[in-house]
Amino acid sequence: MTAKQADAWILDVTHRMRRLSCEVPPGTRPLHAMREEAWRALSLELGVPIGLSTLDTTPELLFVLPRAGEGDGWTPLSSWAPADERGFRLYVQAMLGGWEPPTRTLDVFHFGNDAQLAAKLAHLVVKGVKRGTTGWVEAAAAEGSPIPTVGTVSIVTDGFGYAQCAIVTDKIERLRFRDVDATHAWVEGEGDRTLEDWREGHLRYFHEEARQLAIPFTEDSLVFFEHFRVLAVFGRADA
């Protein structure tokens, strides 16, 4: 028997990708061969794949890392999805539950600044409560994060890189923090949905962001409020 090849698509928490191929010697499981190659070539420890297209001919595996990919060579989803048909097919089946996005120029993000908050807010989106989110314009510029535009399709994850739903941006408002009103707070759907609760939570969040970025945040700071709707909630019920 001769060795066969296995291919892997390795995603970080924002679905940036590294592609890896290896030979699978006779008698060796493709998963074991790929784990050894990932450690040897990239110093990456792979866990259990979330997707596998076949065990015959050329096995294809999809992995998600619990952190951001470090170093060069990581390609954003919006760049690799249009160019990699095999990888995107596997991504659609394993990550999106078979849902076909209307575009391959996809944004990927999670709400909040830690995995627990991200999972909670993604849950509110999926359950129909949360239909808006607020960001600080200056912080987005400092971090190099693009502000969504009308029509942006985003994959929302749980903070560990696992996709929960897809949303599309319907409207972007830019306003001073002090001008956010009770309607915005209700649409954002967090806490008790009052403006007082919204201000308390967001002041705490933005002041922490300001501390980390070493830039001031005030009542006159410019924020953006994104109105979105859900395109799909990912999952299968055919098993």
Image (cartoon, helix red, strand yellow):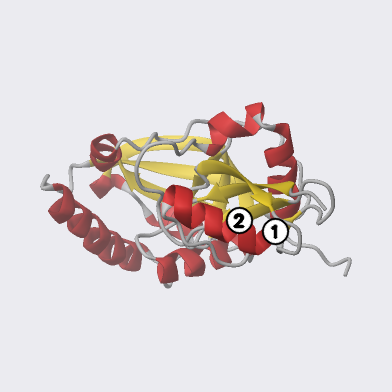
Tell me: residue 160, above or below residue 144: below
Q: Secondary structure at mark 1?
A: helix
The residue at 84%/67% (across/down) is 237
Q: How many marks?
A: 2
The residue at 65%/28% (across/down) is 82
Residue 89 screen position, x and y as percent: 75, 42
Q: Is residue 193 something that shows in the picture?
A: no
Tell whether label 2 touches label 1 (CB within 8 Å).
yes
Residue 208 screen position, x and y as percent: 19, 59
Q: Secondary structure at mark 2?
A: helix
Viewer-closest of 29 and 210? 29
Viewer-closest of 164 and 85? 85
Q: Amino acid at mark 2?
A: Met
Tell me: residue 76, above or below residue 37: above
Q: Which residue is mark 1?
A: 30
Tell me: residue 122, above or below residue 212: below
User: With 101 as the anchor, is 238 left or right in this view?
Assistant: right
Q: Which residue is mark 2?
A: 34
Residue 202 screen position, x and y as percent: 29, 59
